[in-house]
Amino acid sequence: MAKKTISRKSWIALAVFAGAFLLLISSTGLWETVLSFIFPTTRQVLHPRGTLLRLVGEHLWLVFVSSGLATIFGVGIGIVVTRPFGKQYLPLATNMSSLGQTFPPVAVLALAVPALGFGFRPTVVALFLYGILPIIRNTIAGIQSVSSEVKEAAFGTGMSQLQVLAKIELPLSLRVIMSGIRISAVINIGTATVGATIGAGGLGSPIIAGLVGENPAFLLQGAIPAALLAFLIDSFLGNIEKSLSAA
């Protein structure tokens, strides 16, 4: 009962924060007033490319697509290399996913642009490669942490390999897998800002414009919502993780 109460309070607090965040990014007049007060000598304080609400929407779409693909492929690879027929590929999967994070996102973007062009697609590729590692590692760790005695007992009742995976291994490792997805999503929220360098939009657009034009007002208009969005997504996925452990 206590766990359920804590969980309910966490969801209510998150809903209040989400509402406040939505109100903040929708209040163009408030941003203009505050930024004009902080930087009175700056002629233009609002980023002209689009409203903050639109930029947040573009940013979320980049993160949603890249993290969704990373989750599908990361969990899938983690499952395959923990099966008897795929164990030989376990070191390869770990090394290849680690390799994806050794390249800076800007380098991946530079390599992807000639093949995919500018904008959305190369940014998603870079975020996908950068975010898949924690999901693969946590999927492998979660499945391997399931006791062999539990699995043997399941096999003893007549379950097949697929049934043991679906009914025993994945449910017991779900919280660990969810933790990897959470880490990946938060990483991608910060990394997605780099996509603005090749026209992908999002909250990186005012940040890049602020750096190029030496306009601190633009910088704040991108950096503050990006930080709050990372906190919001982390809290949302954290609540899901806690709910899974309480279930």
Image (cartoon, helix red, strand yellow):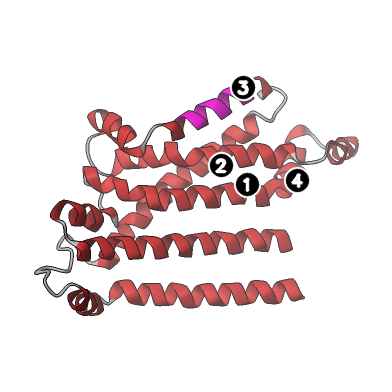
Amino acid marked by disc 2? Ile
Mark 4 secondary-structure assignment = helix
Q: Residue at x 89, y 39 (%)?
A: 153
| Residue 216, percent from left and from top | 21, 63
Q: In this orientation, which residue lies closer to the viewer: 9 or 45? A: 45
Image quadrant occupied by the C terminus: bottom right
Look at the numbered discs 1 and 2 and tell me whether their residues touch, using CB distance below 8 Å.
Answer: yes
Residue 63 colored in magenta in the image: no
Location of mark 2 (residue)? 135
Q: Earlier in the sequence, mark 3 or mark 4?
A: 3
Q: Earlier in the sequence, mark 3 or mark 1?
A: 3
Q: Give above or below for 127 relative to 209.
A: above
Q: Which residues are magenta?
A: 90-99
Look at the numbered discs 3 and 4 and tell me whether their residues touch, using CB distance below 8 Å.
Answer: no
Mark 3 secondary-structure assignment = helix
Look at the numbered discs 4 and 2 and tell me whether their residues touch, using CB distance below 8 Å.
Answer: no
Report the disc number at residue 177: 1
Q: Nearer the viewer, mark 4 or mark 2?
A: 2
Q: Nearer the viewer, mark 3 or mark 4?
A: 3
Residue 93 colored in magenta in the image: yes
Amino acid marked by disc 1? Ile
> Disc 3 versus disc 4: distance between alpha carbons?
24 Å
**Callout count:** 4
